[in-house]
Image (spheres, rainbow, N blue to C red):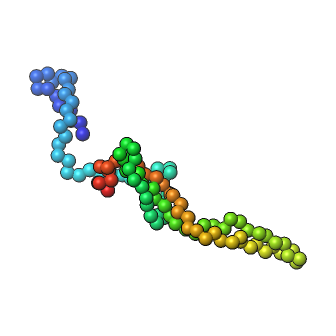
Amino acid sequence: MVQLLRRASNAQSDVVVTNQPKSVQQLETRFQLSNLCRTMHIDGAMGGVTPTLNVHMSVYSEHRAPPSGSTVRIQQDGTAEDKLNADPLYLVREIEAHMIFSEATATAL
């Protein structure tokens, strides 16, 4: 907060700018959504420290791997039968976002 004061000796146009804010009792904020903002379901997180000593965290969701495809058979009566290929037997951890922040921010959270 910048406060403007007039000098008593020259009250015409002499202005002194000072960074001495008055005690702030309340500060209003507004949230604004980025164009990239989206809702994510998060099942877990992993991360560590970057070479510049920031905190790196990746968040992920877990789900079964989808089938690799399907086989469609045309029956003699003209109808189609769609059969999924064998389900893979593993769990996918799909990384939703990487976040990098300072130690001070990590502590404040």
Left or right of 32, for residue 3: left
Find residue 17 and report its horizontal and vertical position in percent: 21, 30
- Image quarter of the C terminus: bottom left
Judge by depth and name the residue closer to the eye, 94 or 38.
Answer: 94
Judge by depth and name the residue closer to the eye, 51 or 107.
Answer: 51
- Compared to residue 14, the image places residue 31 above or below, namely below
Residue that appears at 53% across and 60% down: 94
Residue closest to the far bottom: 77
Residue closest to the far left: 9
Quarter where residue 10 is shown:
top left
Judge by depth and name the residue closer to the eye, 77 or 44.
Answer: 44
Find residue 96 and report its horizontal and vertical position in percent: 50, 57
Residue that appears at 20% across and 26% down: 15
Judge by depth and name the residue closer to the eye, 98 or 7.
Answer: 98
Quarter where residue 9 is shown:
top left
Left or right of 4, for residue 30: right
Find residue 40 and report its horizontal and vertical position in percent: 49, 61
Quarter where residue 52 is shown:
top left
- Compared to residue 18, the image places residue 32 above or below, namely below
Residue that appears at 43% across and 60% down: 45
Callout count: 0
Left or right of 74, for residue 53: left
- Image quarter of the N terminus: top left
Residue that appears at 20% across and 23% down: 13
